[in-house]
Image: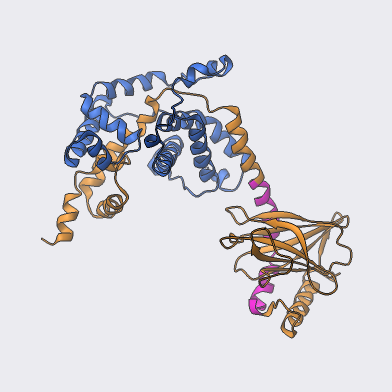
Amino acid sequence: MSDERRLDSELCGDAASYVLGAMPQDEHRAFVEHLKGCVVCREEVASLQVVVSSLPAAVPQLPAGADLKRRVMGVVEREAREQQAARGIGASETPRRARRLLPAGLISWRPALAGAAALAVIALLAVIAFGGGSGSSGGGTRVFHAQVTVPNASAAVRVSGGHAALSVANMPQSPSGHVYELWIKRAGQPQPTDVLFTVSNGGAATVGVPGSIEGVSEILVTAEPLGGSKAPTSTPVIVAPLTT
Amino acid sequence: MQLVYRGNAAAFEVIYDRHADAAFSLAFRMCRQRALAEDVVQEAFLSLWRSNARYDRGRGSVRTWALGIVHNRAIDALRRRAVRDRGLVDDEGIEERLPARERTELEFARRDEAREIRDALEQLPVEQSKVIELAYFGGLTHVEIASMLDEPVGTIKGRMRLGLTKMRMALGDPAEVVP
């Protein structure tokens, strides 16, 4: 009998420790593997799990308290709103189609030929998609879909009454030690804003664009060190042209 | 649960209201500190909300599943923060300090089942109930329990197995305490 098989057989009989959550991590991993091939242990786990599942009822019951509910529901309701906003973005197929046509590398940080070409194609697609305007409108709100370098992520800027908000969906967390920073571009170089943000576990976030958007040609997002930067230190992950 | 997975906050609130007290009670029994217990419950329910933990109908009720998450989070918290080793002051007797209004809201609907389970646990030989309590409510591994009680690991595992088997026999085929 090999050492491995002997070790495996020794795990038989450990079901009680397993269902009680009392196994050290390495033994737990080994036992989970063992369970895949041991019918006897699987049956014992199922049998004892019923008892363990009843143990919480044996403790004195206490109210969780209103403050805890407020804390939990505060997070949940905020994230629900973010998810709804993100789903609003995802409803359009246009950004995905545009991304497939435009390799991420075409979105260049410096105003190079590639970047200009990319934006030209974006504008063309937008004209096709929205019948003459780059932003979809409804009820005085215009939506500008952004180019995102991250696969499966999407972003859009909603403009209403001269002000704008950026919503993102399926974005990864910013790299360790970094946050996302919002930039505004009129003529010349992008200008920093005080908008630094992270995304929810679901990859969603909605942030307001500070000030008026009059004369703004692009909204950009880069990953910057905590505290933000005065000038971009990385290639934008989001470029939203507000062409009209 | 499908509504919760779709991001329906109202559906989540129903789940929270149904199970939060039991979740907090378990977390408090394990952590013995209100603040830590609340953190554990918050973490567990947000995990549930964010679908980091997926409910499998075939493996029991939502309550069993939710309390399983709470239990795992509490163990993580206990092991991470090693609260039991720091000698921090417990919040024992918290139920006596609760405002009267909250006390009247304590959930007694399942007390018969709870008493039955407590009886089954208390009727075990003390060395068996002790290892079960240390493991399940104390978050200790069988290695830690063996060290604490100065007994071989095999003995501790055997007591766990015997104790749970006896409880199973005493409880018959316990239905889910809560649907």
Quadrant, the C terminus of chain A: bottom right
Which quadrant of the structure image shows residue A150?
bottom right
- Majority secondary structure in the magenta region: helix
Taking A77 as reference, is B104 left or right?
left
Residue A191 image point, x, y percent:
79, 67
Q: Which of A194 and A202 is in front in this view?
A: A194
Residue A2 image point, x, y percent:
13, 62
Residue visible at 81% across and 65% down? A135
Taking A205 as reference, is B25 left or right?
left
Does A36 appear in magenta?
no
**Chain in blue in the render:** B
Quadrant, the N terminus of chain A: bottom left
Q: In this view, does A151 lie above or below B73?
A: below
Taking B168 as reference, is A86 left or right?
right
Does A80 appear in magenta?
yes
Instruction: Give the colour in which the image draws chain A.
Output: orange
Which quadrant of the structure image shows residue B126?
top left
Q: Nearer the viewer, residue A117 or A87?
A: A117
Q: In this view, does A138 lie above or below B39?
A: below
Which quadrant of the structure image shows residue A195?
bottom right
Residue B70 image point, x, y percent:
44, 38
Q: In this view, does A91 lie above or below B86?
A: below
Q: Pick out the residue farthest to the left.
A: A1
Q: Which of A232 and B172 is in front in this view?
A: A232
Q: Nearer the viewer, residue B103 or A98?
A: B103
Residue B21 image point, x, y percent:
50, 28
Residue visible at 54% across and 15% down? B104
Q: Pick out the residue farthest to the bottom.
A: A113
Taking A110 as reference, is B85 left or right?
left
What stretch of residues is rendered in magenta? A79-105
